[in-house]
Amino acid sequence: MLWLPVAEPDLTVGPTVLTGGRVLAVAADHPLAERGTASPEDLGDNHVVDFGPGVPEYWVTTMVPTRTPLGRRIPRGPAARTFHEILSLVASGQCVHPLGEIAARYNSPPGIVFLPVRDAPTIHYALTWRSTADGPTLRALAQTAADLGAISL
């Protein structure tokens, strides 16, 4: 199980609203595309996006680990700052990139194949809000989400 991390002290994490697996975005002509699935170990043979210094390291290593399960280093680069930049780099064959399964559900960019990543932990997405915005209305929304339970992809 993997919780999308939030470590900023000014944010409040509420109930989980969605759970889903992971996919690996690869160019359609990448050798992994023919296999139909990927494993976390495959990341050691490919470059993944480098988010640079502006993204909290704890978040990056949770979503895109620095090492494979067997301890091999996962190469970083090229740099990207947005989701669409990631997709462009993947489509051009410059890298592969792990994403939440929800990315594959709502995106079908040309030239990209989303491979299920076997043996990867499930991602749990939770409501998150600025702690200063906390109040009765927001708490009621959070309680309703908790009562309904998380949706599984």
Image: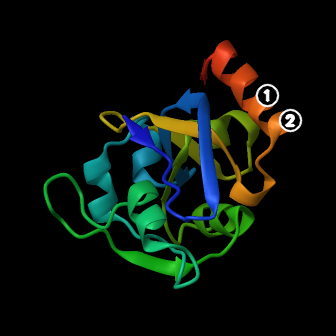
**On the image, numbered disc 2 is attached to which residue?**
137
- Asked if residue 47 lies left or right of residue 146, the reply is left
Mark 2 to mark 1 CA distance (whole Å) = 5 Å
Q: Residue at the spot x=55%, y=29% of the render?
A: 19
Q: Give whichever of 54, 105 is nearer the camera.
A: 54
Q: What residue is shown at x 80% (from left), y 43% (from top)?
A: 135
The correct choice, above or below, for 101 with respect to 75 in the image is above
In front of the other: 21 or 11:
11
Image point 24% across, 57% down: which residue?
Answer: 68
Residue 93 lies left or right of residue 135; in this view the side is left
Is 92 above or below relative to 22?
A: below
Q: Amino acid at mark 2?
A: Thr
The front one of 81 and 129 is 129
Quadrant hosting residue 45: bottom left
Indicate the quadrant where residue 1 lies: top left
Q: Are marks 2 and 1 in contact (CB under 8 Å)?
A: yes
Position of residue 64 measured from the top left corner of the image (x, y, whole percent): 42, 60
Is residue 55 depicted above or below 103 in this figure?
below
- The residue tagged 1 is 140
Q: Secondary structure at mark 2?
A: helix
